Image (cartoon, grey):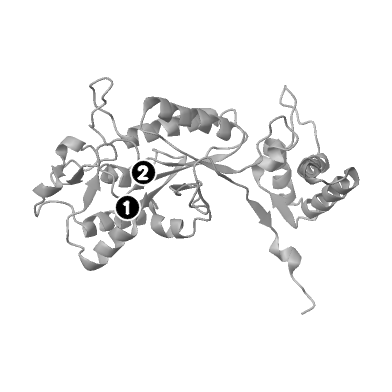
Amino acid sequence: MKRKDDSSEMRTRILRRRYLWKDSQGKVIETEEQMLRRVANAIAAAESRYGATKKQVKEFAEKFYKLMKNREFLPNSPTLMNSGRKNGMLSACFVLPIPDSIDGIFDAIKHTAQIQKAGGGTGFDFSQLRPTGDIVVSSGGKTSGPVSFMKVFSEGTNAIQQGAFRRGANMGMMSIEHPDIINFIHAKNDPTAFTNFNISVKVPDTFMRQLKENPDTAHVVINPRTKRRYVIPHSAAMISYSIDDLLSEDQVNDNCYTVKEIWDMIIKNAHATGEPGICFIDRVNENNPTPQIGRIEATNPCGEQPLLFFESCNLGSINISKFVNKKQ
């Protein structure tokens, strides 16, 4: 009896579940061949905007179709899912800004929902949000802090993925100079929390120089709203302290967290849970190709592509085995 090709069966299941178009009842209405033609035609159609004739567009479509058919190249998932759809989103991942305001935060959540519904991922920098316990001028109350709002983004992703093409993914970043950095470092100690987030600490060159030259100096954090500088005393509750528990920089004493202690805390948690990662943000911006447009503050969910706010990445996969010269 001939054994069924398990990999072929798996590919068919994935195609039917994620990529092949369905009707309003959820019934698959296209084949793999039709999907590849749909994608190739949609991609090639863009050439007409830059002077290509109908014949040339058809030739481009055929070339792109053959690349995919021969498994030499495949575009990212949103391209396979959305090519040919009205207002189809072909980009894989975006970085979105999170301003320090309720309107700004929930605008970001709205954009996140739209992106993830279409199969994309999102990256964020939470460093601009005021720290836990800081004043909310409009109401006179106090904020619950960046990690609490990160939970809102996470729950939004959980809700959206029920009707999305695939499971949502996020990257959350925070500057090591943010007052809530210890809360952030421990955010994923609970394995059931933030299951759709990767998190990374943004580390500037100044911190690394201190780590090398003066590791036992107190680590200074800065309130992004007021720019006031603080140190974190050991007496602050590890994951529930607020800005009121911190000391101003001029009150530093021997019982404050040092640069080395913060670094060791990151390493210990990364070893235990895989989180947080580290992003050497100054090094990233040394290679920012468009610094006149803005500074890079975050990456896509898997960390391989730093992006400006509202930029997207368009990833694809090359099957290297198809390009091996077996005669040599």
Looking at the rendering, in which quadrant would you find the C terminus?
Answer: bottom right
**Amino acid under label 2?**
Lys
Residue placed furthest toward the right: 55
**Amino acid under label 1?**
Asn
Q: Is residue 103 above or below residue 251?
A: above
Residue 190, horizontal then vertical, whole percent: 34, 41
Cβ–Cβ below 8 Å for labels 2 and 1? Answer: yes
Q: Residue at x 70, y 36 (%)?
A: 82
Q: Residue at x 24, y 62 (%)?
A: 210
Using the rendered image of the protein, determine whether residue 276 is visible from the camera's viewpoint.
Answer: no
Q: Is residue 197 above or below residue 279?
A: above
Which residue position holds label 1? 269
Q: Is residue 284 above or below residue 82?
A: below
Q: Residue at x 35, y 39 (%)?
A: 128
Which residue position holds label 2? 188
Q: How would you rate the neighbour count of disc 2 (Cα within 10 Å): few for under 14, some for 14-19, many for 20 or more?
A: many
